[in-house]
Each structure stands twice: as structure tokens, then as C-alpha cells.
Image (cartoon, grey):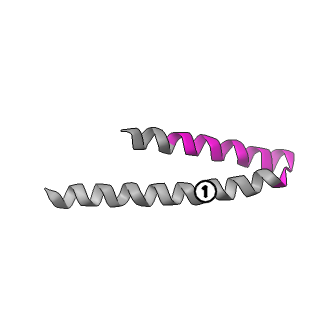
């Protein structure tokens, strides 16, 4: 379940950066948000592959 907590932490971080970008106009926060979203995509893909492997293993 550590993957779930990693996912939640990353979502919280990206959410914070997006708030700074959209509400305060902080361009650097936009860059950090984009990086965080890319990391989120990678983590989600890793989790999907892990679930698929366990499912196929029986």
C-alpha cells in the first residue's frame, strides 16, 4: 500500500503547484506542476503494470 501513499503525496504536491500557477500566476510553479504530472503518469503506469502482473500470476 506504499504505492497508494506515494500516489497521494504526488497528487497533493501537484495540486499545490497548480494552485500557485493558476491563482497567483507563478510561472515556475507551472513548470513544477508539469514535471509532477509527468511523474504522476509514470507512477500510475508502474502501478498498472504491477497490478496486471499480479492478476496474470494467478
The residue labelled by disc 1 is: 37
In reply to whether residue 9 is colored magenta, the answer given is: yes
- Residue 49 x/y as whole percent: 34, 61
In the shown orientation, is residue 44 left or right of residue 19?
Answer: left
- The magenta region covers 8-27
Residue count near mark 1 (Cα–Cα under 10 Å), binned few <14, some 14–19, many ≥20: some
Residue 58 vertical position relative to residue 15 in the rendered view, above or below: below
Q: Residue at x 30, y 55 (%)?
A: 51
Residue 52 falls within the magenta-colored stretch: no
Q: Is residue 1 left or right of residue 54?
A: right
Q: Is residue 2 left or right of residue 51?
A: right
Residue at the right extreme, as displayed: 25
Horizontal and vertical percent position of residue 29: 77, 50
> Eyeballing the image, is 8 above or below 50?
above
- Name the quadrant containing residue 23: top right
> Considering the image in quadrants, where does the C terminus appear?
bottom left
Numbered disc total: 1
Q: Which residue sits at x=63%, y=42%?
A: 13
Say which element carries label 1: helix
| Residue occupying the far left of the picture | 58
Residue at the image point whose x is 74% and y is 44% from the top: 19
- Image location of residue 5, percent across then percent down: 46, 38
Location of residue 25 in the rendering, given as x and y in whole percent from the top left corner: 86, 50
Looking at the rendered image, the quarter that the N terminus falls into is: top left
In the image, 28 versus 22, the foreground residue is: 28
Helix, strand or loop: magenta stretch: helix
- Please name the residue shown 21% across and 57% down the image: 55
- Classify 29 as above or below 1: below
Amino acid at each position: 500500500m506504499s504505492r497508494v501513499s506515494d500516489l497521494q503525496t504526488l497528487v497533493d504536491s501537484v495540486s499545490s503547484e497548480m494552485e500557485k500557477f493558476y491563482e497567483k500566476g507563478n510561472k515556475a510553479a507551472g513548470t513544477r506542476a508539469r514535471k509532477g504530472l509527468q511523474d504522476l503518469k509514470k507512477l500510475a503506469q508502474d502501478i498498472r503494470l504491477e497490478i496486471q502482473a499480479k492478476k496474470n500470476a494467478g
